[in-house]
Amino acid sequence: MPIIKSAIKRAKQTIKRRERNVGIKRDVKEAVKAFVANPSATTLSKAQSELDTAVKKNLLKKNTASRRKANLSKAAKAAGVTLGTAKKAAPKTAAKTTAAKPAVAKKPAAKKTPAKKPATKKEA
């Protein structure tokens, strides 16, 4: 056990970080196993989301997560999973209000002349 105060603090921080990292990695593994057991669009998106979270937390490298996501997508395609990637339809009322607004012509801005400073007197 460390004796120096900063080393004690560092040991405590290491324990907390390790627990957090192990939890995130466990979530990734569980999500991937859930997808393998039951391939569907929701389990696929959950697994990919967990991989993205691990990259964000610097637990996995970007290319490693990309490779794993590609393999998951390949397995999903082989299993015949259809992905729901369609965007949600925008509400019709919003489309009408933006199209119905009349164009307002802007008035040209009046030119302002800068105020002149009074000349300073030189002392003799």
Image (cartoon, grey):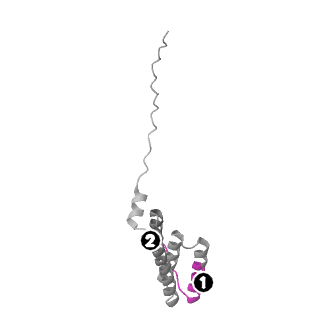
Magenta highlight on residue 66:
no
Residue at the top extreme of this rendering: 124
Q: Residue at x 59, y 75 (%)?
A: 66
User: What element does badge 2 sit on?
Assistant: loop
Q: Nearer the viewer, residue 1 or 47?
A: 1
For the question of whether residue 80 can be seen, the reply is: yes
Residue 31 location, x and y as percent? 49, 82
Residue 50 location, x and y as percent? 49, 76
Residue 41 location, x and y as percent? 49, 82
Distance (Cα) linking label 2 and label 1: 28 Å
Relative to residue 11, is residue 75 depicted above or below? below
Counting residues from the start of the chain, the first of labels 2 and 1 encountered is: 1
Local crowd size for mark 1, using a 10 Å CA cut-off: few (<14), some (14–19), many (≥20): few
For the question of whether residue 85 can be seen, the reply is: no
- For marks 2 and 1, give the one nearer the viewer: 1
Relative to residue 69, is residue 36 depicted above or below? below
Q: Nearer the viewer, residue 81 or 73?
A: 73
Residue at the front extreme of this rendering: 3
Q: Amino acid at mark 2?
A: Ala
Tell whether 94 sits left or right of 48: left
Q: Which residue is mark 1?
A: 74
Q: Nearer the viewer, residue 124 or 113?
A: 124
Magenta highlight on residue 74:
yes
Q: Amino acid at mark 1?
A: Lys
Q: Residue at x 52, y 73 (%)?
A: 54
Q: Magenta part of the protein: which range?
A: 68-89
User: What element does badge 1 sit on?
Assistant: helix
Q: Residue at x 41, y 52 (%)?
A: 102
**For residue 89, which numbered disc appears in the image?**
2
Q: Nearer the viewer, residue 36 or 116?
A: 36
Residue 49 location, x and y as percent? 49, 75
Tell whether 77 sits left or right of 117: right
